[in-house]
Amino acid sequence: MKPQELFIQYEKEVAQFKLALIQRLSGETAVSVQAPKKRTSNLSMIEAVLLTAGKPLHVNEIIAAIEKKFSIALDRDSLSSAIIKQVRKEKRFVRVAPNTFGLRQE
């Protein structure tokens, strides 16, 4: 992440914590404390990008979309390998053309 994005994320978390503390101390309705977000797996990010696109995408398009949506740069070879493993297991993804993958319809 860029330093500016990290700073903004930090400030948001501090503000959310302060708001929850004020609400709790003032006796307002019960505040649900948000658990820290879990790390999103590469396969979950791929699935989210393909779901948003609504169509099969080339590996390069998947990488670009993940970088834009999640601010994470993934290695092309390891990403392709992970998708191909899922295709072979007949889980999550299908190959529709060379290096082009879509979501498996069930």
Image (tube, rainbow, N blue to C red):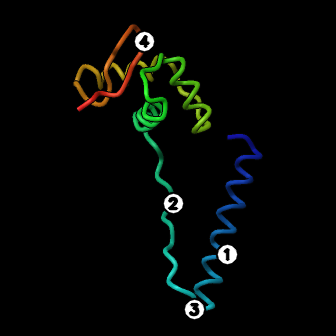
Q: Quadrant of the C terminus?
A: top left
Position of residue 99 measured from the top left corner of the image (x, y, whole percent): 42, 12
Give the residue type at disc 1.
Lys
Residue 17 as seen in the image, left or right of residue 82: right
Q: Residue furthest top?
A: 98
Disc nearest the viewer among 3 and 2? 3
Label 4 sits on residue: 99
Query: What is the secondary structure assignment of the residue under circle 1?
Result: helix
Q: Quadrant of residue 100?
A: top left
> Who is closer to the viewer here, 94 or 83?
94
> Who is closer to the viewer here, 22 or 7?
22
Position of residue 44 measured from the top left corner of the image (x, y, whole percent): 41, 38
Query: What is the secondary structure assignment of the residue under circle 4?
Result: loop
Disc nearest the viewer among 3 and 1? 3
Q: Earlier in the sequence, mark 2 or mark 1?
A: 1
Q: Residue furthest right?
A: 4
Give the residue type at disc 3.
Gly
Gap in angstroms between the C-alphas marked 3 and 4:
56 Å
Give the residue type at disc 2.
Pro
Q: Quadrant of the N terminus?
A: top right
Q: Is residue 42 above or below residue 60?
A: below
Query: What residue do we see at 74% from left, 53% from top?
Result: 7
